[in-house]
Image (tube, grey):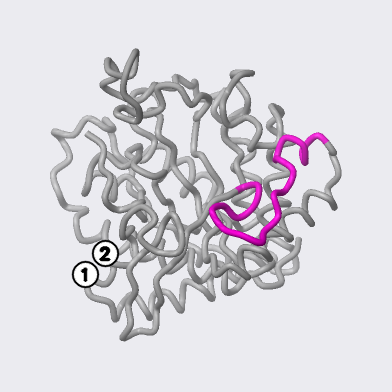
Amino acid sequence: MRLRGTASVVLIGALLNHIGVAARAIVEDTALETRNFEKTPLYVNPNPDNGDSKNTDTAGGRLQKVWQAAYAKARDVVSEMTILEKVNLTTGTGWGSGPCIGNTGSVPRLSIPSLCLQDGPNGVRFTDFITSFPSGLAAGSSFNRDLIFNRGKAIGREAKVKGVDVLLGPTIGPIGYKAQGGRNWESFGSDPYLQGVAGALTVQGVQEEGVVACARHFIGNEQERFRQENEWTGGDWDRLSASINSLIKDRVMHEVYLWPWADVVHAGVGGVMCSYNRVNGTYACLNSYLLNYLLKEELGFQGFVVSDWGAQHTGVDSALAGLDMTMPGEIFGD
């Protein structure tokens, strides 16, 4: 387990997650009976202090202690922030309104700068003097752990030089359910074990360079077509009133789709991006079962959840369901 450079990475993840926790605490008493996104909503706060009982001689124990230290710092900072400052740091300022495709506001009085979120999983996007790395699919096809780790490390290093705080990658969803899926090439292959190993190594490589890795897209994002309404016009798109719905049974969710996410979470990934599609009838970025239970409770994810660009469809409901950051800021769903 490679942990060098992790402290600065998890501090950002812990800070953004703790702001989300604080926001949920403010509105947790809001009546939920009339909302349709979950019959029995689950709102759980991460509890990194549980790591006290773990064997700190293990890699997992050492990483848990890093999260604990980050959360202690995050709690102190968040306790001094106003509601407006919390919103400013967890809301995008508009597509491409800064140096990256996603930019947040800042908190100058606490010396917190604007955060820069930038594609992508195969190298830094929309800039010059960078490397176009082999695709995730090509990297996965090598079955070479060292190569995959060093690829992630090199991507992270270039992102750091370009001023990127959060790199939107690696891609471990889609899993490859549809052979013609438009994003299959970004991920590492159709085998869950391969996706998990390659995703975890990439996360470790990127974050060792002091850049937050944000794994995507959580979850069931198996095709580009019909992934969100109003994305394009003409033809079948004009009849699209909601994003495509991914129907996934519990056993399939755990044994196939969720498997690689467990690996990247255990590798210490700082961020997770929720996807455009619906899962079992509920939008992924509005699904408390996915975000609060499977991701934050069952897998023990300690970082922050950010929406795909324009994948948020509600305000308070999304925050309660586990969404910590909205991007890009000026785009809303229905």
For the N terminus, the quadrant is: bottom right
At 53% from the left and 25% from the top, the residue drawn is 222
At 70% from the left and 40% from the top, the residue drawn is 136
Percent from the top left, x then y, of residue 74? 42, 74
Q: Secondary structure at mark 2?
A: helix
Q: Nearer the viewer, residue 58 or 71?
A: 71
Residue 143: image tag: none
> From the viewer's perspective, is 112 left or right of 169?
left
Q: Nearer the viewer, residue 287 or 49?
A: 287
For the C terminus, the quadrant is: top left
Residue under label 2: 87
> From the viewer's perspective, is 101 left or right of 40?
right
Q: Is residue 137 above or below residue 77?
A: above
> From the viewer's perspective, is 258 left or right of 234?
right
Q: Amino acid at mark 1?
A: Leu
- Predominant secondary structure, magenta span: loop
Q: Amino acid at mark 2?
A: Val
Q: Secondary structure at mark 1?
A: helix
Q: Quadrant of residue 282?
A: top left
Magenta range:
121-141
Residue under label 1: 84
At 30% from the left and 53% from the top, the residue drawn is 329
Q: Is residue 277 magenta?
A: no
Q: Nearer the viewer, residue 135 or 248?
A: 135
Q: Quadrant of residue 213?
A: bottom right
Percent from the top left, x then y, of residue 291? 42, 43
